[in-house]
Image (cartoon, rainbow, N blue to C red):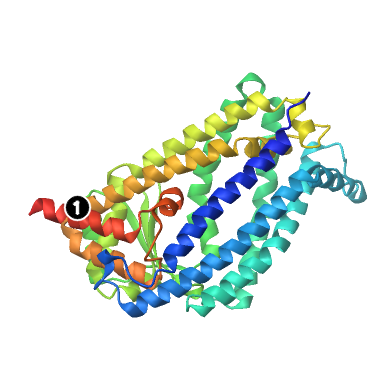
């Protein structure tokens, strides 16, 4: 008797949905609390708290609906054999175009084209509601419907240009990889990640946003001085026009070796009137670099990717596994999809572990910025970001531990204050 892999996968998906819904309900209850956490009393204004509460509850209600529809569709696709049916149907279109239905690469690309159309149809209504109802209601959405669809079309075009060669390469590697398949797949993905990290900020990101050099002035001088003091190889300092789409603010850095760049959202500059607050946020980001957090995270991702491919090579020829999901053949892409579903339990555990590490890194980066003398400015900057982004003020400890890669504001402020007390 064959093991019911598909039924087990669907069952676990539903169990995880129920567990995460329980956490969502706990968080929803926390969001409904009418008062600020004691740590934030006198720090966050009552007006901002009420706005944050309303925004968070709106997003929470939307999340419940979106997750219910998602689990319903995903479970139905697997349980009722829609996945193998769609695979077979996607192959029947190829002869109509004069193409060979037996060519796995062409069959896979046809399948992915159908999946892309389906995902756009099912996701569009949610994206529109999130952007033009929830985000607009709370003053964040700045984009027009034309800009929304222009970005959508650009994203589809990029997928059409970049997707086929990547997918084709993976299929060829799997078909010819032999006993060293896991190594070849990992090496390909490693090189691909480096290429994408290189071309994304230079060729892809500018398709969606405008990047301009930060104007000469006190803020630029302070950031350059900070970078120089840490021997951070800052080559370019940009401002991105995030305000064309949203009022949310952020800052990030990227680049390899001696070619580092820092990007500030224009909304961050507008919201933080004090330059020291912005510099403190950058000091935090540079802390991640100085403490090698980025390198450690990259290495962890590479190890996990290799282990995943190693696991895939062990099950890719399992006829029982493919038959359980309704397939009488063993296409490469379908094998990868099925494998991803079968390791969902491990993925959740790994994700939880990575979140714990990430939260630890955030505390370390905060402490690093504080040691540089930016403790008060960082505290003010974190509060300002929390206020302006209307982030949740009350968080359930179980929910945040499971989902958050960054500690809640209350915990970060408590850590900064605790360090102050130790110094005293």
Q: Secondary structure at mark 1?
A: helix
Dot 1 alpha-carbon crowd within 10 angstroms: few under 14, some 14 to 19, many 20 or more: few
Question: Disc 1 designates what residue?
Answer: 229
x 74%, y 44%: residue: 78
Question: In the figure, is residue 17 to the left or right of 218?
Answer: right
In the image, is residue 287 above or below residue 297? below
x 53%, y 53%: residue: 22
Displayed quadrant of residue 65: bottom right
Question: In the figure, is residue 361 to the left or right of 245?
Answer: left
x 45%, y 48%: residue: 402
Q: Is residue 214 visible to the viewer in this orientation of the structure?
A: no
Where's residue 59, x and y in %? 52, 67
Which of 63/226 is in front? 63
In the image, is residue 244 above or below residue 414? below
Q: Is residue 316 visible to the viewer in this orientation of the structure?
A: yes
Single out the residue that lies furthest toward the left: 424
């Amino acid at each position: 008797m064959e093991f019911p892999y598909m039924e087990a996968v669907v069952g676990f998906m539903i169990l995880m949905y129920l567990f995460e819904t329980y956490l969502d309900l706990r968080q929803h209850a926390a969001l409904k609390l009418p008062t600020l956490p004691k740590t934030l009393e006198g720090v966050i204004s009552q007006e901002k708290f009420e706005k944050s509460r309303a925004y968070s509850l709106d997003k929470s209600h939307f999340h419940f609906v979106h997750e219910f529809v998602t689990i319903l569709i995903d479970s139905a696709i697997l349980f009722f054999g829609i996945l193998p049916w769609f695979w077979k149907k996607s192959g029947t279109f190829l002869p109509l175009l004069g193409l060979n239905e037996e060519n796995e690469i062409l069959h896979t690309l046809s399948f992915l084209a159908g999946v892309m159309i389906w995902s756009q149809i099912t996701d569009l209504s949610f994206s529109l509601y999130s952007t033009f109802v929830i985000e607009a209601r709370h003053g964040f959405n700045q984009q027009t419907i034309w800009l929304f669809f222009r970005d959508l079309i650009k994203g589809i075009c990029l997928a059409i240009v970049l997707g086929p060669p990547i997918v084709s390469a993976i299929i060829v590697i799997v078909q010819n990889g032999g006993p060293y398949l896991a190594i070849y797949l990992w090496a390909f993905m490693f090189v691909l990640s480096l290429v994408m990290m290189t071309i994304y900020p230079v060729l892809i990101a500018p398709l969606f946003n405008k990047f301009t050099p930060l104007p000469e002035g006190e803020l630029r001088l302070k950031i350059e001085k900070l970078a120089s003091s840490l021997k951070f190889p800052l080559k370019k300092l940009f401002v991105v026009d995030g305000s064309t789409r949203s009022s949310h603010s952020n800052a990030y850095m990227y680049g390899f070796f001696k070619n580092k760049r820092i990007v500030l959202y224009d909304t961050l500059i507008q919201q933080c009137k004090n330059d020291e607050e912005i510099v403190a946020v950058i000091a935090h980001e540079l802390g991640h670099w100085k403490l090698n957090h980025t390198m450690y995270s990259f290495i962890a991702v590479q190890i996990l990717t290799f282990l995943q491919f190693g696991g895939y090579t062990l099950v890719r020829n399992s006829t029982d596994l493919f038959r359980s999901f309704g397939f009488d053949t063993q296409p490469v892409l379908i094998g990868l999809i099925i494998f991803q579903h079968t390791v969902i339990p491990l993925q959740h555990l790994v994700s939880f572990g990575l979140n714990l590490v990430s939260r630890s890194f955030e505390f370390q980066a905060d402490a690093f910025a504080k040691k540089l003398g930016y403790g008060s400015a960082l505290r003010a900057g974190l509060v300002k970001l929390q206020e302006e982004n209307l982030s949740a003020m009350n968080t359930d400890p179980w929910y945040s531990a499971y989902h958050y890669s960054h500690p809640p504001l209350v915990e970060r402020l408590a850590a900064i204050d605790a360090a102050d007390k130790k110094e005293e």
